[in-house]
Image (cartoon, rainbow, N blue to C red):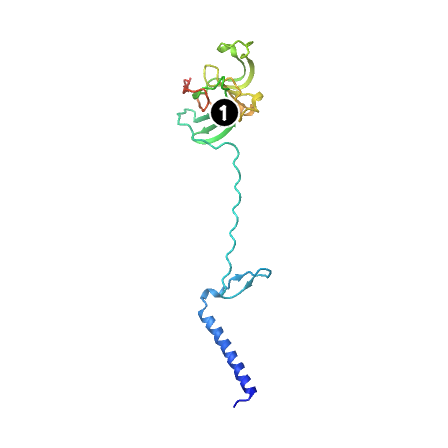
Amino acid sequence: MLSTTKHARRSAAKGVLAAVAGTIAVALVMPASAHAAPITIIPGLPPVEIPGVPAPPKPKPKPKPQAKQNGPAVPGMPAVASRTGWVALADDATHTIHWWHNGSYNRAMPISMGTNKHPTPNGTYYTKEKHRSMYMDSSTYGVPVNSPEGYRTFVEYATRMDWNGIFIHAAPWSVAQQGNSNASHGCINISMDNGRWVFDTIPRGTPIVVRGTVGGGNWRTPRD
């Protein structure tokens, strides 16, 4: 019969052998990738490498908020021929005129067109003569200046769109309406800076398509 001391020694030896055998077994079944031990993060403790324990998935980065686009969306370019390379679309729904050059979008401008009582007719216009400054007079189309609907107004950077008195011109008095509502007698009102740009940039014979007004019809002016 073994003494109590010898029995304890044999039990301890068996425990050591079992631990060594377990370590060897784990080493044999571990994949080669275990050499690069994953990092396991335990809340409240620094990251610890634990061989054989998969690392928790990394949190996905939150998508960055996209900046809001300013102004109206860009519509499709009107399918009209242009000998100047420039094409414009005056859209009453957004009170905006859009410009393209050689098929590429160029810029947008807020506008104010004719009121419901004096609407700008829908259709295609072609730019004509230009006036650095001029007086617009209602008597030229039969409305006396001194009548309730009459006017005689000094304007700058006026580009004629037809021979019946419709221009695109600077109108600093209607800047508050430009981009929001219609306030003219049929002309396309734009700011002073935009009027200067049209005057200096847009050649004679450039098509300007007017769309969405209560003017109805499909107005079309001659190219000259």
Residue drawn at (47%, 74%) of the image: 24
The residue at which mark 1 appears reads as: 201
Residue drawn at (53%, 61%) of the image: 39
Position of residue 17 relative to residue 32, above or below, is below
State the image coordinates of residue 186 (x, y, percent, origin top left). 49, 18
Q: Nearer the viewer, residue 142 or 35?
A: 142
Q: Quadrant of residue 3?
A: bottom right
Q: Quadrant of the C terminus?
A: top left
State the image coordinates of residue 129 (x, y, percent, origin top left). 48, 17
Residue drawn at (55%, 19%) of the image: 156
**Extreme bottom residue here?**
1
Identify the amino acid type marked 1. Answer: Thr
Q: Nearer the viewer, residue 141 or 204?
A: 141
Residue drawn at (48%, 28%) of the image: 98
Secondary structure beneath label 1: helix
Q: Is residue 219 left or right of residue 45?
A: left
State the image coordinates of residue 26 (x, y, percent, origin top left). 47, 71
State the image coordinates of residue 4 (x, y, percent, origin top left). 56, 87
Q: Nearer the viewer, residue 181 or 32?
A: 181
**Extreme right residue here?**
44
Q: Is residue 5 left or right of residue 224?
A: right
**How dense is the environment of label 1, judged by Cα within 10 Å: few (below 14), some, or many (20 and up)?**
few
Position of residue 23 relative to residue 179, above or below, is below
Position of residue 131 relative to residue 26, above or below, is above
Total tally of numbered discs in the picture: 1
